[in-house]
Image (cartoon, grey):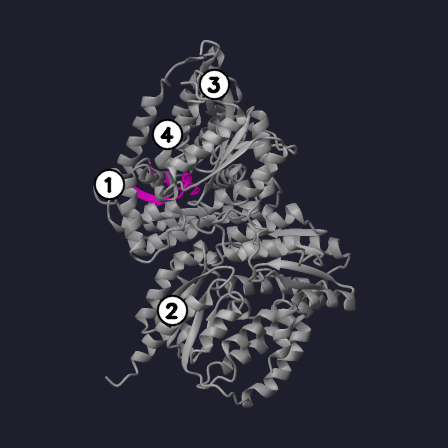
Amino acid sequence: MSDIKRYKTEPLKCWGKAKELRANYYKEYKEAKSKGGICWSGGAEAIDVIPYAFGDDVHSLTAEPYAAAIAFDPEFAHRCESALESKGWARDMCAYMRNYWGSVLIDEYAFGGPFPKPDFNLQSGFCCTHAKWFQVLSLWEDVPYFNIDIATIPFWKEEFPNRLQYIVDQMHESIEFIEKVTGRECDDERLIEGVYNDSRTTSLWAKITELNQNTPAPLDEKSMYSLYVFTTLDRARKEFVDFYEELYAETKDRVDRGIAALATERFRLMSDSQPPWAFLRVWRYLEQFGVVSTGSIYTIGLEGVWDIADDWSLTPREDLKSRGVELKTRDDALRAMADWHMRRPIYAMFYNADWKSKLMMQYAKQWNCDAAMLHLNRGCEGTSLGIMENRAALIKTGLPVLTYEGNMGDDRDFDEGRTIARIDTFMEGLGLKKLT
Amino acid sequence: MFTQFKDWYQNRHDYAKDWKARTGGKVMAYMCTYVPEEILYAADVLPVRVYGSHEASDLTEQHIFGMYCPFCRDCVAQVMEGRYDYADGVMIAQACLHMRQVYSSWEIHKPTEFMYYMPFPIAVESPHARPHLVAEYKTFIEAVEKWTGKKITIDDLDRGIEILNKNRELMRKVYELRLLDNPPLTGVECMHMTSSSQMVDKREHNQALEKLLKELPSRKTDRETGIRLMIVGSECDDIEFMDMVESLNSTFVADDHCTGSRAFWNSVEPEEDRLLAIAKRYLERPPCPTKDTTKNFVRFHHVMEMAKEAKVEGAVIIQQKFCDPHEIDIPLLRKRFEDNGIRTYFLELDVTVPIGQFKIRIEAFLEMLRADELPF
């Protein structure tokens, strides 16, 4: 064992801050109405800077991370899932949607008390569940609902003005919708500030994850799952920008000082799709072999915004202010925001297996990965689109690939023993033995 | 009377190959009924919708994860088997994730000279979808012109619209006959008619429909109508299944699925801007669940209107396994039916249909419906 190189490790200094911010987020949503504020809900794709423009007492509940929080507590998740299944809904639908719906049906908030009904739902979507998720919820909750269709080809691939205009037009209409249902006026100055913040948050996350290209990796993916969530919660909030500034500086410092996430790092993985939230301990199991999971196209590109070059190489996109983009009007702000978010690599997952394969190959190259571990996720059709084609493409490049079946939100679809056995066999094939 | 339609349906690939040989034209294999066929007819291209074969295949596992729907898996199997090798082009009008995967795998493994992904809007009720879709049509036309080398004129578009509208109008007339107390056709025959319309040159299909409509109203069938059923759900060309149901003293008199009425129900209303007219037609057609996303629940209203008009006694709700959009709709839709006094039975379909098991279940459903008529 003395031959094994050991890197210095340190706990993340801002870890406590992350926990506090997350707890506050869910508390603020719950208490918004009692404090005279507004609460609304939508998915991670929702353009949350729009409600942000209606005041600092407007609080959101982002559906996917909320559903992931439910999944992390299997007992609660089972009650949510059972409630839905007993009403006739299939258990193979989007697992996040099922957890969220179930929480509404049993009227329990994952963070205590009854489920706080939103004042309205605002969604955006490009898969076949996003919009329908809130269609049904809005019926049950009897609240107003607006969906912004963002199912256009991603801009980083091909640029057509009508596609941007379509989204911008809907964004304008969504402002009118919120004005009508809340009786408030949109504060355009706040909207502009929020757009700058949003672009800073999502650019910073890309920069933070870029640092994981270093060896040793300063962050491990299990921790990244807790840190990336702020890009999905309320991206425009100043406290999230500040947190990522802090995290970026700290991660950079770790790189400069050679601080590792895993002391025994000797093998680097890339993953794919959302993880099975109830079984994140699998990532710790990998560490016993000296394996660090550096991230994935999903982790870096769900909300992180990147410049994607013709050769598919990935560079964090500088935020709007750094790029010198001047926003003077509401239309400027909405247009810039639509253009910004359509550049996320996540689009490749939901559209085209070949694009995603190219991005994954590029990821493996830039992040110096030795192998890939792909989650055949029964809980999300979107991130599973083309995953078998991705597997074949990666193998063709010579990268060893392990697949395992699971479900991000429903632990009943995950066989932990079998997955561990597959990992053991995979590691054996790679010549890796447990270090401890 | 329906032999021609059945023959086209069963020998679709032979037909397409023969059509190419006869006309020298190009064939576009397409996925999803949101593809604007008017534009393809204007370009003298034959649109052929991609269907499965209902045969078990071991060719899909390496391409598609197991929780994707059987229809998309079956379609990929057809592509990998080389059954669509005659296609000169392949396109998709953006639909569900599953069909996006079919397009993706096709593009990777069997690319044709023309591959096209049309980002059809999801928010079909949004006023902003119209100009967006018109712009997409313009882009599409430019691509098709480049591919075929043929300029598409207004007259060409009018011709495309006329061919499609004629087909829709004639099939609507056939559907009116399904409303009669004793419909002169079965659901299976209707299915052969509607499915074949998505596979053959609609000009020939129209001729066959005109001939059919001369004879059909006076047709005397040697079967009882029995219980009037509606079939509702996702893609359905499960002829064997429908045949089995109709062998149990029942008749499908209405349908809402994309191999049936949903694909042709409304027509293009003429207006100066042809592309806007076409766009409105597709945006306002009875929606696929993927595009029925507002609190208006347009699809449910349409389905219930059809059911009432056809005096439906029971509805068979079918779903391709793992189809999320339908799975989301089904419990709410069943409730709508039940609230309107129409009982429903739900079945999940795979590539092959377990006829024996389904027969027992359907028999029980029909018996339940008949129980209301018993004198006790």
Observer-nearest residue: A69 or A282?
A: A282
Task: Classify residue A435 as left or right of residue A20.
Answer: right
Q: Nearer the viewer, mark 4 or mark 2?
A: 2
Q: Position of residue A351 (x, y in %)?
A: 55, 45
On screen, A360 above or below B324? above
Discs 2, 1 touching: Cβ within 8 Å: no
> Disc 2 on helix, strand or loop?
helix
Between the residue at mark 1 and the residue at mark 3, the CA separation in whole angstroms equals 50 Å
Which residue is under mark 3? A265
Discs 4, 2 touching: Cβ within 8 Å: no
Magenta stretch bounds: A38-55
Q: Nearer the viewer, mark 2 or mark 1?
A: 2
Observer-nearest residue: A79 or A330?
A: A79
User: Between disc 1 and disc 3, whose residue precedes?
Assistant: 1
Q: Quadrant of the N terminus of chain A?
A: top left
> Disc 1 on helix, strand or loop?
loop
Q: Residues within 10 Å of mark 2 (few under 14, many from 20)?
A: some
Which residue is under mark 1? A36
Discs 2, 3 touching: Cβ within 8 Å: no
Tell which subunit mark 1 falls on. Answer: A
Which residue is under mark 4? A281
Between the residue at mark 2 and the residue at mark 3, the CA separation in whole angstroms equals 57 Å
On screen, A167 above or below A303? below
Q: Position of residue A367 (x, y in %)?
A: 55, 25
Task: Classify residue A341 as left or right of residue B228.
Answer: right
